[in-house]
Image (spheres, rainbow, N blue to C red):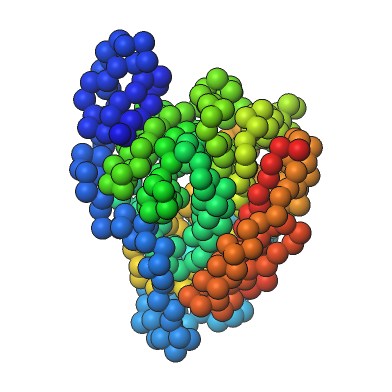
Amino acid sequence: MVSVVENGGYYNSNGGRKRSPSGEETRDTKLATISEVDSDQPEPYDEDLLLYDHEPKRFTSTELGKKMNESSKRGRPRGKKNAITQEIVVDLRDLLTQCAQAITNNNPISVCDILKKIQPHCTPYGDSTQRLAHYFVKAIEARLAGNGAEVYRASNLKKISAAQILRAYHAYLMACPFHRMSNILANGSIEKLSRGKEKLHIIDFGILYGFQWPCFIKNLSIRPGGPPELHITGIDLPQPGFRPAERVNETGNRLAKYCKRFNVKFTYNGIAKKWDEITIDDLRIDRNELTVVNSINRLRNILDETVVESSPRDTVLKLIREINPDMFVLGIQNGTHNAPFLLNRFREALFHFSTLFDMFDNTADRQSNDRFLYEQEVFGREVMNVVACEGTTRVERPETYKQWQSRNVRAGFRQVPMFRDKVEEVRSKVKNNYHKDFLVDEDGKWMLQGWKGRVLYASSLWKPA
């Protein structure tokens, strides 16, 4: 049995008309806009996401150097016959910082002069610094034009299919362990906690396309004694436009097909609204179910007390405390680019995204279209939001894991130890299958991940105090 809850009604994975809990027949108005919604067969890249034993190929330094040389012509600055020098690489970052300083000083002439020096070296197909400069320049131009919020909103309205996003996400998984290892730790912890339980309810704050769950569903299906009944509540922010719940409901359809394929009894409840406006009744808690709250790298998108006096971020944590979950799995992006003043925020963001672009440049082919799409749709959109948006339209507001530690304790949670075998599994996979400059470390009861000594992501487990 596979059923999905949408806007208060239940429907089966075959689609068509459905009946609400009261028995009234309603019309399924959700429009299928991506091909896999109409097919019971997952796409080839879905299969890749299901198989976590599909390890990335680890290039030797010689192989990677050869690949970079083959693709370097596309990223060469116009009018230059030689490869970009280290001095110019450093200058680009310095010039970008000077540009932010000129904006802060309200000196548009100086900004334009500096942009003229940067633009010949900007390209989304070049080396890491040229790509970084490309997206920062676009954000600076949007800020100067005063339409940063509109540009960011338009990027949300672009029609990119889940299949395209999936291919880009898969390229990222193969090049970088951050999301994959966060999922391994989260999913493994939930699996261990749910052993012997007949019903499992996962409340996922920030489910997006649901890429975290296919492998989890597969692993549940082979559990000794059979899988539990799986109930997922997928929560996301409403999408702009006339169908705010479209993506979160399509995610439910996709997960329903995985559950059907692996014979896991499944119910889904899709919620698309502001997270601080969600009530406990929206979540349909059943105290006979093991309840787990999961949020991986998305709570940074909720506003904090610097924007709204009664912090929506703390309101969401209070809601999670009210749920009284058996476990709260928290993954965060460790960042300091959330300052209210542009210059400080810009400098920290430049440091943060320099690290991410450098990581991708050392682990993925520059000519990869999937890499380009991921950088554009993830890194590029984040840069646009951080630099060109202010107030309630700036939703990229990361905090450090130590700040989240304080927030969670204030909200009434206590941190619990991680499962050692899961942490060691992550260490082993990163060491054996990824670039040597990736790091996995621990601080207290946090698992930290980073690149070249900079901590970029952190994961932890919590229970109500």
Toward which corner of the image does residue 3 lie, by quadrant?
top left
Q: Quadrant of the C terminus?
A: top right
Q: Position of residue 345 (x, y in %)?
A: 69, 51
Q: Position of residue 155 (x, y in %)?
A: 43, 42
- Judge whether residue 182 can be spotted in this image: no
418 over 27 or under it: above or below: below
Left or right position of 170 against 356: left
Toward which corner of the image does residue 48 lie, by quadrant?
bottom left
- Judge whether residue 41 can be spotted in this image: yes
At 58% across and 62% down in the image, what residue appears?
A: 422
Left or right position of 463 against 79: right
268 over 429 or under it: above or below: above
Q: Of residues 406 and 147, which is closer to you in this image?
A: 406
Q: Position of residue 259 (x, y in %)?
A: 33, 43
Q: Of residues 74 and 208, which is closer to you in this image?
A: 208
At 48% across and 75% down in the image, what residue appears?
A: 433
Q: Of residues 136 and 174, which is closer to you in this image?
A: 174
At 27% across and 46% down in the image, what residue appears?
A: 261
173 over 200 or under it: above or below: below
Left or right position of 179 against 108: left
Q: Quadrant of the N terminus?
A: top left
At 59% across and 64% down in the image, what residue appears?
A: 421
Q: Position of residue 230 (x, y in %)?
A: 43, 38
218 over 36 or under it: above or below: below
Q: Of residues 436 and 408, which is closer to you in this image?
A: 408
